[in-house]
Image: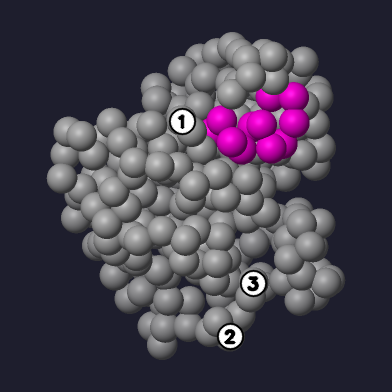
Amino acid sequence: MNKKLVLKEFEIDELKVKVYSDRQSMGEQAAIEVGNKLKDLLDNQEYVRMIFAAAPSQNELLEFLSLQEGIDWTRVTAFHMDEYLGLKDESSQLFSTYLREKIYAKISLGKVYSIDSNSNNLMEECARYADLLKQAPIDIICMGIGENGHIAFNDPVAADFADPELVKIVNLDNISRQQQVNDGCFASLDLVPIKAITLTIPTLMSGRYLFVVVPGHTKSNAVFKVIREKINKDCPASVLRKHDNSILYLDRESASKII
């Protein structure tokens, strides 16, 4: 990676922030660093457990991560962090479909655990997924930040930094739903589901290493709140400043209000 592409590096509380000149450079460098951490962990433990976000903001990270050499993916277990309710199985908008297309089909993962959003008993599905997550620590989480500052689908109205649940059903706020239209995932707001299953904030914060990839001008307000304002539930992602192994990757557009 050409160091000239790194515009700025700094820390805010525990959160490390790296700003790159463009989206591709940001995604490629994040993928290199995720890959290096994976290899380090696999050198010292038998298995690695990872959680992936599913969103267009993750496209570059996942593309370059699938190309990293020297990773024994057969020793990696993958989870995803949220899923819509109300979509048909194999819908192109399902996050499980996105991850299968963007990375799972390109590597040889040992295990993949997906949220069944069409389960006949959604409370039991939340409990099942929580039990899987509790079986061992989560080593790496690759994630983004929403336009309203959400992480996973923990929108400001429902964010709980001390949530007793690991996995729960949530109502999506309209900013979160409109983002899905802005990202080109749905043609109109009325087509975006109003409910989802999500991992909670404590579940995300329990990951050993957090790699947070946030490109694009539509995220600049959220990035400003994370960096410049106090840690609070009005911007759930601000809690990332309390995690001592977290890195926020930005491009010039997403960082436009802080540089």
Check contact, mark 3 vs mark 2: CB within 8 A.
no
Disc 1 marks a residue whose amino acid type is Glu
Whole-percent x and y of residue 62?
54, 49
Label of residue 93 in the image: 3
Task: Determine the secondary structure under disc 3.
Answer: loop
Q: Quadrant of the C terminus?
A: top right
Query: How far is the residue under mark 1 from the one under mark 2?
Result: 35 Å
Q: Secondary structure at mark 1?
A: helix
Q: Which residues are magenta?
A: 20-30
N-terminal-most mark, 1 or 2: 1
Query: Which residue is the site of mark 1?
Result: 33
Q: Which one is closest to the eye, mark 3 or mark 1?
A: 1
Residue 25 is covered by the magenta coloring: yes
In the picture as drawn, the residue positioned furthest to the front comes out as 69
Per the image, is 244 magenta? no
Q: Is residue 164 visible?
A: no
Q: Is residue 145 above or below residue 93?
A: above
Q: Amino acid at mark 3?
A: Gln
Residue 242: image quadrant is: top left
The label on residue 88 is 2
